[in-house]
Image: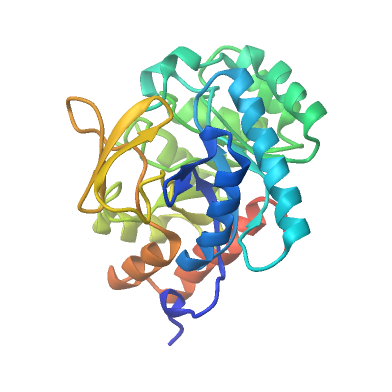
């Protein structure tokens, strides 16, 4: 039987990763991104999308500059490293009410998203791949219609209900970011975004599979409900991944890492993960999920979402 957690060479693609090994994309340090790329093969990662937080527009541009420089240096130096596929822009077009650990002061309404994205594209053409957005906010649907054919638009950090999510999918959104996290739940009379994903079979769906963000029984349900060619495993890891327990910065927030879990604020809320793709693949198989489905979710589907072949 194929066991993708036991591979001896990097095969995984992580399309939502903020940091690891003490580094964070939002530091806007090209040296830090290089160190991440050099070490991610330890986690079985062959390719990744450096992912930004909700930070100021100028700092977002600095992150893109750092990613571009890191790509140039890695290409020149060669050797072993995880390839950079492009940037995943998680913020800032999110609902302040669902911002979680992200800094809501830097949230930008989708009505202004076009100008921000155009500025990024003009300076770093082709580097931006995934854009997260809360579709219920002013200007979101117009943005999705205008940019959905150029980027992967993913619903995230949102209070959207079932109908709004379906409208966004109809407008051109093609993905959901870390399903069931930072969004309304799926209930018997309000199926929410998960219900909309179930009724729109062509939507890609990210899942954090550490067994903490989503319980093992629910993971088994998701791997049954979502088509096997549309479910995507992500780490959503922060700089504490691959590091000892302690307190680490995630953008402006202090995050405590203890026993494989993140904690922030008085309520001890989750703030990303400290898991990795190899660990998640192993856990999913231990939870009873078909290893071939796990492989597709960790290896093939993340690339399909970006229309990339490696």
Residue 289 position, x and y percent, is 36, 70
The quadrant of the image that shows the N terminus is bottom left
Residue drawn at (48%, 27%) of the image: 163
Furthest toward the bottom, the residue is 1
Residue 167 vertical position relative to residue 243 in the rendered view, above or below: above
Residue 79, quarter of the rendered image: bottom right
Residue 150 vertical position relative to residue 61 in the rendered view, above or below: below
Residue 157, quarter of the rendered image: top left
Residue drawn at (65%, 19%) of the image: 113
Residue 29 position, x and y percent, is 58, 38
Q: Answer left or right for 7 relative to 124.
A: left
Residue 17 position, x and y percent, is 49, 47
Residue 248 position, x and y percent, is 33, 38
Residue drawn at (52%, 23%) of the image: 55
Visible residue check, residue 140: no
The quadrant of the image that shows the C terminus is bottom right
Q: Answer left or right for 267 relative to 203.
A: left
């Amino acid at each position: 039987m194929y066991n993708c957690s036991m591979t001896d060479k990097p095969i995984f693609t992580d399309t939502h990763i903020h940091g690891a090994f003490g580094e964070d994309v939002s530091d806007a340090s090209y040296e830090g991104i290089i160190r991440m790329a050099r070490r991610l093969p330890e986690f079985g990662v062959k390719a990744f999308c450096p992912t930004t937080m909700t930070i100021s527009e100028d700092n977002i541009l600095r992150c893109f500059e750092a990613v571009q420089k890191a790509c140039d240096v890695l290409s020149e130096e060669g050797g072993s490293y995880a390839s950079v596929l492009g940037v995943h822009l998680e913020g800032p077009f999110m609902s302040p009410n669902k911002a979680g650990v992200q800094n809501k002061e830097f949230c930008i309404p989708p009505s202004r998203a076009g100008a921000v994205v155009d500025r990024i594209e003009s300076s770093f053409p082709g580097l931006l791949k995934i854009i997260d957005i809360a579709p219920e906010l002013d200007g979101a649907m117009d943005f999705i219609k205008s940019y959905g054919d150029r980027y992967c638009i993913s619903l995230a950090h949102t209070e959207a209900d079932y109908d709004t999510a379906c409208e966004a999918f109809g407008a051109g959104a093609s993905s959901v970011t870390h399903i069931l996290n930072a969004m309304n739940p799926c209930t018997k009379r309000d199926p929410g975004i998960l219900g909309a994903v179930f009724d729109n079979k062509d939507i890609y769906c990210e899942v954090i599979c550490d067994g903490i963000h989503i319980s093992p029984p629910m993971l088994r349900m998701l791997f049954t409900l979502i088509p096997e060619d549309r479910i995507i495993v992500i780490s959503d890891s922060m700089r504490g991944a691959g590091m000892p327990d302690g307190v680490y910065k995630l953008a402006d927030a202090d995050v405590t890492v203890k026993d494989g879990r993140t904690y922030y604020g008085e309520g001890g809320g989750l703030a990303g993960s400290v898991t990795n793709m190899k660990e998640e693949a192993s856990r999913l198989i231990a939870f009873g999920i078909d290893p071939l489905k796990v492989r597709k979710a960790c290896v093939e589907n993340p690339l399909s979402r970006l229309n990339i072949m490696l």
